[in-house]
Image (cartoon, rainbow, N blue to C red):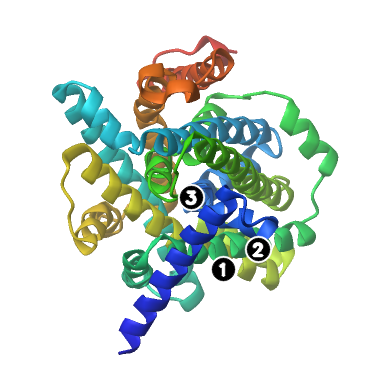
Amino acid sequence: MVCRKTRSAALISTERTRSGMSAVLSGQRRGLSGKLLFAGPAVIASIAYMDPGNYATNIQAGSGYGYQLLWVVLLANLIAMLFQALSARLGIVTGKNLAEMSRDQFPKPVVWVMWCVSEVAAMATDLAEFLGGAIGLSLIFSLPLIWGMVATAIVTYGILIFERHGFRPMELIIGTMVAIIGLCYLIQLSIAPVDWSAAAAGLVTPTLPDAAALTIAVGIIGATVMPHAIYLHSGLTQTRALIRNEEDRGKVLRYSNIEVMIALAIAGMVNMAMVMMAASAFHQGHSDVAEIETAYRTLTPLLGAAAASVFLVSLVTSGISSSVVGTMAGQLIMQGFLHVRVPIWLRRLVTMVPAFGVVALGYNATEALVLSQVVLSIALPVPMVALIVFTSRRDLMGPYAAGPMTRMLAYAGATMVLGLNFVLLADTFGVPIPLFRD
């Protein structure tokens, strides 16, 4: 009986939201409260930009290079804003998500390759998210990491159940978690002795001191511009609002663009706060701090128990929420490419197997997190290029096709990611990189 009441209340919340959006679009409802009903898809997508993979790469960036790599975080966030806005536009205009559009428009061999690459990316994503939540829980409750993973799996599945009851309950849950993470890092910045002038210089001065900095930079991009978030955003917007005419569509697109800018700006500031916290706490005297567990234990004597506790709360919240979003994205990717829907528990099981394998084989958890972000960065051009192709086509997008300036910026972003990946692969296989010769 309680379960039925909960489900009924959740469905009422979703229908009330949809009805309210229609009233705003028709001009019957005005004010900020009505416009906030359109917020949700970008908030959910933004959690992918604050996942534990970001913690791993940002800690390494701040501890090893101080504020010097903040410009990479800013650049990655600007690229993310553009591609999330394009993804949302695709769903709103065509009523199809990126995976469905790829299945319909590309030859079958291309679709199969795209699906395989996207599945690898989904598993790499879940590896980072799942391990992050497990590390946090194991540190809080002094549990073996494997039991932290089990607890993370149970909590994640419990939250995923709410997806059955409509889009609004999940948006509110994830939105609350985003707020918790943001609050945690506001507290961290109030405790840490940040050198604000050095931080400002790091934001606007592009530099890569050595090959290790390049690896971290590519990891930051892989942890910030996420393949699964690009797929997911188009799915979250495709049927959310009831659009009756082109005027409605234009309004929904404007609200979507505003939400993307705000949600991703918040995610970007959280990432910058992570780097600044690590730079202020570790760079002078503890520049070798590269693991999440070491960062937590080092924070206590440096900044106090409160800073360390807040760090763990944000990590656990990040791991659980991003794991939920990752599973949602994996479900959408499989359904879109293959037109096959599997039970959510099975999808959850498939994507967390690699994480359990990493722990069972005794690999370093933080190193696995960073490497997972590099894998994501290498997989990223697949959805990026597909999204540019589709949103540039007037036969699919009509008057909402991307203009010359948008296309130029999108291709520049994709080219930058491809270029960084090429240099990283060359370095990995021992090919000399002239940029880093003495």
Q: Secondary structure at mark 1?
A: helix
Residue depicted at x 44% and y 56%: 322
Q: Quadrant of residue 69?
A: top right
> Of the residues under marks 3 and 2, which one precedes in the sequence?
3
- Amino acid marked by disc 1: Val
Q: Marks 3 and 1, how far apart in space?
A: 24 Å
Is residue 57 toward the left or the right of residue 239 in the image? Answer: right
- Amino acid marked by disc 2: Cys
From the viewer's perspective, is residue 57 above or below residue 74? below
What is the x, y in percent for residue 329? Answer: 34, 48
Quadrant where the C terminus sits is: top right
| Residue 145 can be seen in this image | no
Residue 77: numbered disc = none
Residue depicted at x 63% and y 25%: 209
What is the x, y in percent for residue 178? Answer: 57, 59
| Residue bearing the label numbered 2 | 184
> Of the residues under marks 3 and 1, which one precedes in the sequence?
3
Q: Which label sits in the foreground, 3 or 2?
A: 3
Image marks 1 and 2: residues in contact by CB distance under 8 Å: yes
- Amino acid marked by disc 3: Pro
What is the x, y in percent for residue 156? Answer: 36, 67
Q: Marks 3 and 2, how far apart in space?
A: 23 Å
Image marks 3 and 1: residues in contact by CB distance under 8 Å: no
| Residue bearing the label numbered 3 | 41
